[in-house]
Amino acid sequence: MDIHEISDYKSEYKVISDRPYLHGDLFVGNDIRFEDDNIIKSADDKLICNAVNRGRVAIFIDGSNLFYAALQLNIEIDYTKLLVYLTKGSQLLRAFFYTGVDRSNDKQQGFLLWMRRNGYRVVTKDLVQLPDGSKKANLDVEIAVDMMNLAPHYDTAVLVSGDGDLAYAVNAVSYQGVRVEVVSLRSMTSESLINVADCFVDLDSIKQEIQKTSHSGFNYR
């Protein structure tokens, strides 16, 4: 280990020391590993997000990714329950919901209005029709920019997405001392995203806690 490596090591340790919510919890970053006796997890099995003090929490939800995950699970998401579960009693800085929109879809517009009035900051982009006739709006850039710009103001990021394109942004905010929790359906989640997160929660394991018990109310589409 040369002097530069020692300097980098001390720098990373200082970041951890300055973030009290990391003490007594598992930290995985590069090849450095911190854990206590109550948390025994391997690097390939980061399934439990168990911080005692998560500090300020910011939530970033990829609406389209969550919608297709819910279809795979054959459930409808209760977004009030979802917000409660993801916050887990911590101080919420902001909960962002990113989605493509069809301005002529009154049902979707009603759903987004409900979201805005019930704790979510909605970020939208118009759907673009592709040559095959399908419509798509990619909001990866918006999610990444918001995660990085707000990093000095939160301690824990909860990313609800399985998109591997967001791995670089997750890694970047981690180097600013932010703890990152990824929540997604395991079969739809990139390995690169799981590898850079501090922990991963499979939506299949929490579906009972976040699904609607009836089919009333607004739906995503």
Image: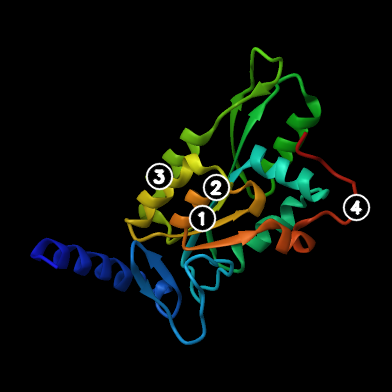
Residue contact between numbered discs 1 and 2, judged by CB atoms under 8 Å: yes
Vertical comparison of 192 with 113: above or below: below
Q: Secondary structure at mark 4?
A: loop
Q: Secondary structure at mark 2?
A: loop
Q: Residues within 10 Å of mark 3 (few under 14, many from 20)?
A: some
Quadrant of residue 154 in the image? bottom left
Q: How many angstroms separate mark 1 from mark 4 (CA)?
A: 32 Å
Q: Earlier in the sequence, mark 2 or mark 4?
A: 2
Residue 155: mark in rendering: none
Residue matched to label 1: 194
Name the foreground residue: 163 vs 123.
Answer: 163
Q: Which residue is mark 4?
A: 214
Residue at image position (51%, 80%) is 39
Left or right: residue 40 versus residue 131 is left
Q: Name the residue carrying label 2.
A: 190
Camera-side residue of 74 and 80: 74
Residue 134 horizontal/vertical position (percent): 70, 20
**Which quadrant is the N terminus positioned in?**
bottom left
Q: Nearer the viewer, mark 2 or mark 4?
A: 2
Q: Earlier in the sequence, mark 1 or mark 4?
A: 1
Q: Which mark is residue 168?
A: 3
Q: Reading the chain from its start, which is encountered first: label 3 or label 4?
A: 3
Whichever of labels 1 and 3 marks the residue nearer the N terminus, that label is 3
Q: Is residue 93 left or right of residue 19?
A: right
- The residue at 22%/67% (across/down) is 9
Q: Is residue 65 left or right of residue 207?
A: left
The amino acid beneath tag 4 is Ser
Instruction: Name the kind of residue labelled 2 in the image.
Output: Ser
Q: Nearer the viewer, residue 11 or 113?
A: 11
Compare marks 2 and 3 and give the one earlier in the sequence.
3
Q: Nearer the viewer, mark 3 or mark 4?
A: 3
| Type of the residue with mark 1 | Ile
